[in-house]
Image (cartoon, helix red, strand yellow):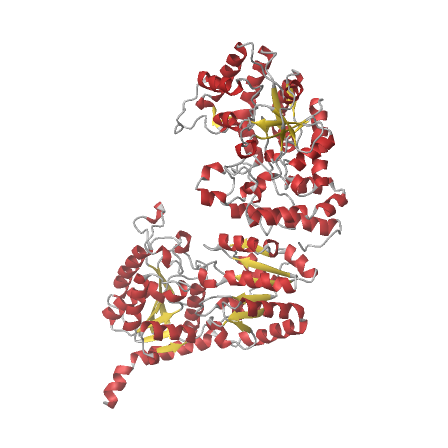
Amino acid sequence: MHVHQPYRVREYSVFDTSIDHNYFTEPDTDNHRSNEKILNKVADKSYRPMNALLEKLLNKHPDFKVSLSITGTFIEQAEQWAPDVLESFKRLVATGQVEIVAETYYHSLAFFYSRTEFERQVEMHKDKIRELFGVETNVFRNTELAYNDQLAQWADGYGFKGILAEGWDPILDWRSPNFVYKPEGTENIALLLKNYRLSDDLAFRFSNQGWAEWPLTVDKYTQWMEASVQDQPLVNLFMDYETFGEHQWQDTGIFDFFEEFVNKWLEDENNTFYTTSEAIAANEPAGVISMPDTVTWADAERDLTAWVGNSMQHEAMKHIYSLEDDVIRTQDNDLIADWRKLQTSDHAYYMCTKWFTDGDVHAYFSPYDSPYDAFLYYINAVRDVRWRLHETHRTGGLSG
Amino acid sequence: MKILMLGWELPPHNSGGLGVACYYLSKALALNGADIDFVVPYEAKHDNVDFMKIHAATKLSPLHKFGMGAYDSNFLLEEAGRDDLGELTTIRDVQKRYVDFVEELVEGKQFDAIHAHDWLTMEAGMLAKELTNAPLIVHVHATEFDRAGGNQGNPIVHEIEYQGLMMADRILAVSAITKDIIVEKYGIPADKVEVVHNAIDPESLNDGYEYDNRTYRYLEGLKDEGYTIISAITRFTIQKGLANLVRAVAKASEKYDRFALLLAGDGEQRDELIRLAADLGISDKIFFTGFVRGKQWRDAYSVSDVFVLSSISEPFGLTALEAAHHDNALIVTNQSGVGEVLQSIFRYDFWDTDRLADQLVGIATSPALKDSLRKNILNEYARLSWHDVAKKCMSQYTKAASPAALVGAFA
């Protein structure tokens, strides 16, 4: 389960650039874009009730296991505005039944722009998880599950034992996502593939009354799970943590569903739960899988076009990553942190215009009036980073 | 001389140049002895007006807030969707109320001339003429052909314009370009149309304003690095030709990379312009301010080096004169009326992005060229005075009132 909150850019105008260096805090905390307000809202609707439920289930069933992907930007926000939520995550990890997976601290797509910056963010995340939870991360998942062979090879070389990716049919062909695989061109690392059908039944379809299978009962879902793992070792469910309580509200019955499902699944002694590391340890790779082109978990295309599909997104990424050397050289921690917060993939996602053609407005939640507004506030903030470099550190010019 | 002036907006409740022109024209007329009753379609305070009597035709607050400003004929039949408008939900509704109001206002009164501005008030003008027998002077600041920017335009607006122009005793056009449209598109005899260019009141801009270089600090930083700041301060509509300006800046940037473009304003074309800039890979060179007023508006002119009036069809283009006042070099399309009264400017056809790019690079790379353009236009623009415009109007009032008598004398 993936726990993440970005630092959304406030309504940051041309008139703020080079004058006010606060990009992320709306002056009005009641603004619908306020990061504090959103974190508190999601904490009430999702993090607190779901963590309570997970804690209950973990204590009740020693065989119940969960793996969490928790971003650095979420942790920082929780430290600031909802420390009790962070404490409850610590209690979950302390049960020994919860694994934390590795990723970029800033939920960025840095792998595709700068390998050095990418590695720094992976390091930062490892350090933060160690400091906060006292555990090591051994399995890697990239932002948006954006995966290709090169990433797997990098993770293998880095020393990760496993890596996660989308189990996308055009890649798998006749193969099932319910096995452990070996990525192309790697030595020791194992590949776990998300079973997107069974994952998305919960994440996207659970409360959709237009869905032929609605309402989804525990019995029905358990049957699907049983059918899926028949003669196969495992099912990898991966979804946003916020599925529980935020994407699917409490009144849809998602919490009760989850609790009953875990109970029911473990009633059968042939069933169990694995953390990602356990799944890898328990299964030899069934074969080699190659994904030369990047595959993500998004949209019908399963590519990066929701983040870098239009020219605004390309421009935004080009300009933020072009500042890397100058920003790092300053050793100015505030500046570096601001620059990194602007790398969070959500910013680019808000500039997505795909839904204009898809007509699928609801699939692209954004706190902005339009992708164009998102772009303008972002580019104004990028310019201000450049201004600070220029003004305070005399590195680089204002020219982009 | 008693004048019934039919307008749609006055500063500070204006959405653009029409209100500004009406204000300074009326002020200059009053100084020339005119006694003016000025009708607006909304109710608001005009603290800056003591030289004429303002009449509010409705209880509405200023209309541009509802998208019913002087330039929004595309909202003609669409409902503005605001409860506080009562039953007046379209521009047509407001116009009808305006006509009713004028009908009551003129009852039992005598005027020497009725002066109606643009299609918005032409119906009221025609009715007032009928009721009072005073001559009707129709003042054309823009036609529907201009607003439509090469498209068809609204047939109802065309029809009202046609009737108003036919019924008018005299027509004032703000430029020769506008006169040509009136003559060619509406079939009005050329000798019925007088070109009366707008002017600028430099005094009005010398109101203690001082440039604050912190407003656009980033642009000032770019200037320190040798950048040339190009600006357009306008509504983002098709009529303004901004897409071609963006393309020209992209082309110019290929030859010389130190350009930034300040686009101050807002409008329906904004998103398209953002997308275009990104497609051309020059997003970082373009600064969108949103709608600016007051200091931010003045400072936008001040930070700029080169002001481009890129309109596809611009009856006049007062902003060019404002830019000249703020020490900008000017580049103006051949399709803009203001070019008719200025010499020290660059000109191009609105579609000719190559030529505009050349001119931009030329100005940016030659300080001598830039400085002489700026200095010369600064000497030139202030010669256009509202006092002269008012005198021309007065003579047109007289002319409009007299042809019948002339015919009688010489028959």
The answer to whether residue A351 is visible is yes
Image quadrant of residue B31? bottom left
Q: Out of B134 and A70, give the one closest to the viewer.
A: A70
Image quadrant of residue B307? bottom right
The answer to whether residue B327 is visible is no
- The quarter of the image holding the N terminus of chain A is top right
Q: Out of B217 and A62, give the one closest to the viewer.
A: A62
Q: Is residue B73 left or right of residue B358?
A: left
Image quadrant of residue A96? top right
Q: Is residue A71 left or right of residue B82?
A: right
Q: Is residue B360 above or below residue A114?
A: below
Q: Is residue B161 above or below residue A330?
A: below
Q: Is residue B399 left or right of residue A56?
A: left
Q: Out of B30 and A20, give the one closest to the viewer.
A: A20
Residue B273 rendering spot, x and y as whole percentages = 51, 55
Q: Out of A248 and A239, give the one closest to the viewer.
A: A239
Q: Residue furthest bottom?
A: B410
- The quarter of the image holding the C terminus of chain A is bottom right
Q: Going 67% across and 74% down the picture, which residue do you hit? A: B368
Q: Is residue B230 above or below residue A171?
A: below
